[in-house]
Image: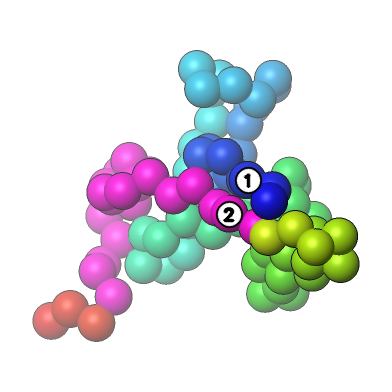
Amino acid sequence: YGVVDFLWYRRHEGVASVSSPGYDVIDEWGRPIRDPVWWPSSLGGQGFKIVADSLNKMDLKLRIHVMRGISSEAVKQNTPIMVSK
């Protein structure tokens, strides 16, 4: 299987590493979404579908690492929680 490791949702400034400056790419609810700069196949709402389909053709499965908790970018932007009152 192929693994998309954590920080797949981070827009890096410069070299991509854990300590590189950047920010999390999030939707209106603060959920992490693919950075279209690093994942151009995700444009148009495709998500990881194109990558997953390519791996599937090679009899591989896709695993995506998601960090639990609330994104620091969502906290900074004070995004609402989906379906909350």
Name the amino acid, label 2: Arg
Is residue 48 shown above or below 74? below
Q: Is the residue 41 above or below the residue 84 in the image?
A: above
Q: Which residue is mark 1?
A: 3
Question: Do we see residue 41 in this rendering?
Answer: no
Q: Position of residue 77 (x, y in %)?
A: 33, 51
Mark 1 surroundings: few (<14), some (14-19) or many (≥20) residues within 10 A: few
Percent x, y of residue 50: 79, 67
Earlier sequence position, callout 2 versus callout 1:
1
Q: Position of residue 39 (x, y in %)?
A: 74, 52
Residue interval drawn in magenta:
62-82
Residue that label 2 marks: 63
Q: Position of residue 2 (x, y in %)?
A: 69, 48
Task: Name which residue lies at 26% across and 67% down.
Answer: 80
Residue at 67% from the left image edge and 74% from the top image edge = 45
Q: State the SS at label 2.
A: strand
What's the mark number on residue 27? Answer: none
Q: Position of 1 compared to 84: left or right?
A: right
Q: Nearer the viewer, residue 59 or 64?
A: 59
Q: The C terminus appears in which quarter of the rendering?
A: bottom left
Give the side of residue 67 with respect to residue 14, left or right: left
Q: Are marks 2 and 1 in contact (CB under 8 Å)?
A: yes
- The structure residue drawn at horizontal position 65% and vertical position 25%, both measured from the top left corner, is 16
Residue 73 appears in view:
yes
**Residue type beneath disc 1:** Val
